[in-house]
Image (cartoon, rainbow, N blue to C red):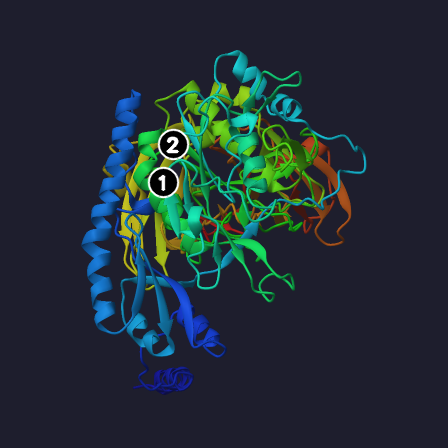
């Protein structure tokens, strides 16, 4: 063996040994402890027992995995379809959760309640019980049974530019409801549930059999005083939600909210009608009087609602809602912890919201009143909910005192809104003004009923799509996003259109018939449990929905699926003329990538560009090349994720100095459509010549455009494309 070769082998061996030296063996360890277990361990430092909600892993028969309810053609089939979903859920809970409950009880756990329609049980646990819970692989999480407050904000002042107050007949005009009423769509035939602190049932806004059912779930936590009739822990039937004794605050908030959603007193000189004046109401009292000064911030008592009582209300609605033609649930309550992303894995309430949505019932939840710019409170952070923020006075603009975030789905009037209130002297005729996202949310719950009365065969996705698509894009200088404020009349026109696919958008997939390379989608599930993923494929030009591909990803695993395999499964083979955008919706928190194999360069390229509704880091494209940099031309790829055609506007800066060069807008881009533009074309349009071959610029997308942008460089010498965009998780 010659000396050069020997030296090379020795050097290579030394490199291998050096690399190996950087690895070290670690002793075997037990299974990792989930985050919820660590949290409970910390809580036991100050508590002997904990009141918890144990959430079991739902199979594909539950939650987001439930098959979409077929579109019904009559009220009878609509009810039957919803009842079928509820029955599937109940049987699943019976088959999978109850045996687990038996096993846990045999191990000494104190199970205090088993819910019938959600894979959740309530328990009082000790520290010694943690081992038994942690050992089970069918438990998603163990949640503390926490308190929420009502989300009104009486202390929020009117905006400085106006001290007028928004009477109901003003907010319904501003929200387009009165125009919808004139067309005959008033929410007739449907019901709205109000989860709150009760209702003054004999108020004039609720006359003429407006209230068709009542329920109460209260005081289930030790030490709390029930607000149900006769201090019972639960009650149903007439009067169950209208036991308004115990102070004027009892029933005041719920009465005000119910009046905005569906109140109707058109006989007065100043008509007071809610958003859906012909819809029915199902008030459910879920608050209790808490007498702990530590919980009530020093006060002797306060009205709060526990997660357990809210879940009991969900259970009752899943069982009884279909018979009452329930279409919307209003939740104007929440905590104070900010969530900048979806909280489905951290709140036990997501299961019920998911199940009701599959039944065709939408849940409108207030975003909160803490002034957050990029966060909302729980349970508004549940993905399947319609999260509601608020506008000022008569809809003139977003209220910065309320929580705003890309998680907020729609805006509605929420400042100094008039509705029914509690008054001991005049209990049936008193009205008052309140502010908060609590007041905005029933505007949306009522709007849902109005849209449903326009098209009884519509499902939840259609209604939410129409609500957003008919809204007016609204933004503030502190936002990097925009949110539609509702206009029910305009939304009527969108009820017959196909909704935008749900999920995170990944763009630029090459069809399987393209011979220069192959597109793959990689799906990563970092969790310990398996989860379902739905991939909706949208052809970009001409715009066409190719269908939805579904796959299950095992826990701790990754799947790589070739584009042509998805096309074959959807019956769409042979398409080669257009790129495809994927909408990826997963039942778990994970990641996805758009990977391309380039046959000429024999290389993999990561072309991942994604946008979540939680964050939008893709507003900045850095170091974009002019064509003067030979061999590396830059392209700007833009995807419109909005509900209507729109153009993107960029501010362009010198990448070296940060100096502003100019602003430039694009052509109108159809919704759910991607265009790819040479960066040099932007410079040509500006008549800009930098005069140097090393010049680069930064593109910054202005707020208000709902979409995804990417910076792609064509490495012409290597024959590969490179994605220069910052990556983001989905």
Q: Quadrant of residue 699?
A: top right
Return the residue nearer the eye: 616 or 238. 238
Seen at 46% across and 22% down, the residue is: 187
**Quick check: 352 above or below 446?**
below
Mark 2 element type: strand
How crowded is the residue under tag 2: few (<14 C-alpha within 10 Å), some, or many (20+)?
Answer: many
Return the residue nearer the eye: 228 or 435. 228
How crowded is the residue under tag 1: few (<14 C-alpha within 10 Å), some, or many (20+)?
Answer: many
Residue topped by disc 2: 326
Q: Position of residue 661 (x, y in %)?
A: 75, 42
Q: Earlier in the sequence, mark 1 or mark 2?
A: 1
Q: Quadrant of residue 681?
A: top right
Viewer can see residue 554:
yes
Is the residue under label 2 in contact with that under label 1 (CB below 8 Å)? yes
Distance, label 1 to label 2, CA atoms, is 8 Å
Q: Quadrant of residue 97?
A: bottom left
Return the residue nearer the eye: 319 or 580. 319
Would you say 500 lies left or right of 629 here? left
Seen at 45% across and 49% down, the residue is: 607
Q: Position of residue 89 (x, y in %)?
A: 26, 45
Viewer can see residue 580:
no
Seen at 56% across and 25% down, the residue is: 204
Seen at 59% across and 21% down, the residue is: 176
Residue topped by disc 1: 317
Q: Position of residue 642 (x, y in %)?
A: 52, 33
């Amino acid at each position: 063996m010659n000396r050069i070769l020997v030296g090379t082998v020795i050097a290579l061996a030394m490199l291998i040994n050096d690399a190996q030296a950087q690895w070290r063996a670690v002793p075997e360890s037990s299974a990792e402890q989930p985050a919820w277990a660590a949290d409970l361990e910390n809580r036991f430092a100050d508590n002997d027992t904990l009141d918890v909600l144990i959430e079991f892993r739902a199979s594909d028969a539950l939650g987001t995995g439930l098959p979409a309810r077929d579109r019904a053609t009559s009220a009878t089939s609509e009810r039957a379809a919803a009842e079928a979903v509820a029955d599937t859920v109940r049987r699943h809970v019976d088959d999978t959760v109850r045996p687990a409950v038996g096993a846990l009880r045999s191990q000494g756990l104190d199970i205090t309640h088993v819910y019938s329609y959600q894979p959740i049980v309530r328990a009082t646990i000790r520290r010694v019980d943690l081992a038994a819970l942690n050992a089970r692989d069918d438990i998603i999480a163990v949640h503390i049974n926490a308190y929420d407050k009502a989300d009104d904000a009486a202390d929020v002042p009117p905006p400085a530019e106006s001290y007028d107050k928004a009477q109901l007949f003003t907010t319904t005009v501003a929200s387009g409801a009165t125009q919808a009423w004139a067309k005959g769509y008033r929410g007739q035939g449907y019901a709205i549930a109000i989860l709150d602190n009760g209702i003054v049932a004999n108020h004039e806004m609720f006359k003429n059999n407006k209230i068709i059912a009542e329920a109460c779930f209260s005081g289930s936590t030790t030490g709390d005083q029930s607000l149900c009739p006769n201090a019972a822990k639960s009650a149903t039937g007439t009067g169950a939600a209208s036991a308004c004794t115990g102070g004027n605050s009892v029933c005041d908030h719920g009465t005000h909210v119910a009046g905005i959603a569906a109140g109707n007193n058109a006989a007065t000189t100043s008509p007071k009608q809610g958003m859906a004046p012909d819809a029915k109401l199902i008030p459910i009292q879920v608050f209790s009087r808490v007498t702990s000064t530590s919980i009530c911030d020093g006060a002797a008592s306060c009205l709060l609602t526990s997660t357990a009582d809210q879940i009991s209300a969900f259970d009752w609605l899943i069982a009884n809602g279909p018979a009452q033609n329930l279409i919307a649930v209003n939740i104007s309550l929440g905590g104070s912890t900010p969530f900048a992303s979806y909280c489905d894995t951290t709140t036990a309430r997501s299961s019920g919201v998911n199940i009701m949505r599959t039944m065709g019932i939408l849940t409108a939840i207030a975003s909160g009143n803490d002034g957050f710019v990029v966060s909302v409170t729980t349970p508004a952070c549940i993905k399947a909910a319609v999260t509601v923020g608020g506008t000022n006075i008569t809809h003139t603009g977003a209220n910065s005192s309320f929580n705003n975030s890309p998680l907020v789905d729609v805006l509605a009037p929420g400042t100094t809104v008039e509705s029914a209130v509690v008054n001991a002297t005049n209990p049936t005729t008193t009205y008052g003004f309140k502010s908060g996202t609590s007041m905005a949310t029933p505007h949306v719950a009522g709007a849902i009923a109005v849209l449903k009365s326009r098209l009884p065969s519509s499902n939840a996705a259609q209604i939410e799509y129409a609500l957003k698509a008919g809204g007016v894009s609204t933004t503030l200088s502190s936002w990097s996003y925009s949110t539609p404020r509702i206009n029910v009349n305009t939304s009527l026109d969108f009820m017959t259109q196909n909704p935008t696919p749900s999920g995170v958008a990944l763009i630029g997939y090459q069809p399987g018939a393209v011979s220069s390379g192959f597109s793959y989608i990689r799906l990563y599930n970092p969790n310990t449990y398996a989860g379902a993923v739905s991939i909706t494929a949208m052809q970009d030009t001409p715009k066409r929905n190719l269908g939805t591909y579904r796959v299950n990803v095992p826990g701790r695993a990754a799947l790589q699926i070739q584009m042509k395999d998805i096309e074959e499964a959807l019956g769409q083979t042979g398409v080669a003329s257009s790129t495809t955008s994927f909408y990826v919706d997963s039942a778990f928190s994970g990641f996805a990538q758009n990977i391309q194999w380039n046959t000429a360069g024999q290389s993999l390229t990561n072309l991942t560009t994604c946008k979540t509704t939680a964050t939008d880091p893709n507003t900045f494209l850095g170091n974009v090349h002019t064509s003067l940099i030979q061999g590396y031309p830059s392209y700007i790829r833009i995807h419109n994720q909005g509900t209507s055609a729109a153009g993107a506007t960029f501010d362009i800066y010198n990448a070296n100095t940060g100096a502003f060069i100019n602003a430039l807008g694009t052509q109108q881009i159809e919704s759910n459509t991607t265009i790819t533009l040479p960066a040099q074309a932007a410079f040509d349009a500006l008549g800009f010549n930098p005069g140097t071959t090393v010049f680069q610029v930064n593109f910054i997308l202005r707020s208000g455009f709902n979409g995804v942008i990417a910076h792609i460089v064509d490495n012409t010498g290597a024959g590969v494309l490179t994605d220069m965009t910052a990556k983001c998780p989905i």
